Image (spheres, helix red, strand yellow):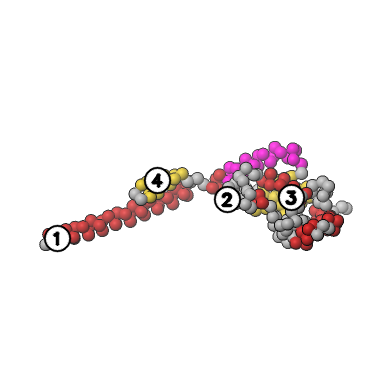
Amino acid sequence: MFLENLIYLLLSFAGELKDNEKRDGKRRRRRRRRSRRRGEVGVIVFFGQIVSLYHHSDMQQSRARLFKEYKEVQREKVADPDIQLVCDDTNIFKWTALIKGPSETPYEGGVFQLAFAVPEPYPLQPPQVRFLTKIFHPNVHFKTGEICLDILKNAWSPAWTLQSVCRAIIALMAHPEADSPLNCDSGNLLRSGDVRGFNSMARMYTRLAAMPKKG
């Protein structure tokens, strides 16, 4: 009889512990959800130990960084006349840029428009950048405007800014990498040594798409 009572008490105690753990788990999940929404400190339990996690809103950090870059862009307008960066009026995560084709290249005299889509984890992740203006270049997809540039992929660093990305794209226009082409026709011309043919095609598309119409 004593043994049966003992087993009954142990089972009851175990059931109460399980119920308490369930209630505590629900309360912790509710607190974490509220903390995430407010961007406050979250709390988790790991093997019975309470660990505090400082939860920062990625979007708030990105907005602060982009606002800082916006102010820098306003100051650098005169210092860097080859780049004109503009933030969307309603969405700070969308930008456009006008860049001038580098001198002594087939893009000279052209003005090319870029579109920036900035992710919420920026600057920890790179922006997505593409050409809106048609361009004949081995590292730019002719139809989509996608750009093959290492800093926009695996070589990205938070030290880069939207302004410096524009400078890197201008440098890429002047020094194409024919070994990793997105435009195979353009890359094949350069790899075969037909620089004259490449320059002729690139200059033609610059005149058609990137130069203002006269008259």
Residue closest to the far left: 1
Question: Which mark is first along the chain, 4 or 3?
Answer: 4
Which residue does the numbered mark 3 point to in the structure image? 172
Q: CA distance from mark 1 to mark 4?
A: 40 Å
Disc 4 crowd rating (10 Å Cα; few below 14, some 14-19, many 20+) is few
Disc 1 crowd rating (10 Å Cα; few below 14, some 14-19, many 20+) is few
What is the x, y in percent for residue 210? 80, 53
Question: Which mark is first along the chain, 3 or 1?
Answer: 1
The residue tagged with tag 4: helix, strand or loop? strand
Q: Which residues are magenta?
A: 62-81
Q: Nearer the viewer, mark 2 or mark 1?
A: 1
Q: Nearer the viewer, mark 1 or mark 4?
A: 1
Magenta stretch: dominant SS?
helix
Can residue 186 be seen here? The reply is: no
Which residue does the numbered mark 1 point to in the structure image? 3
Question: Compared to 142, does 76 lie above or below?
Answer: above
The residue tagged with tag 1: helix, strand or loop? helix
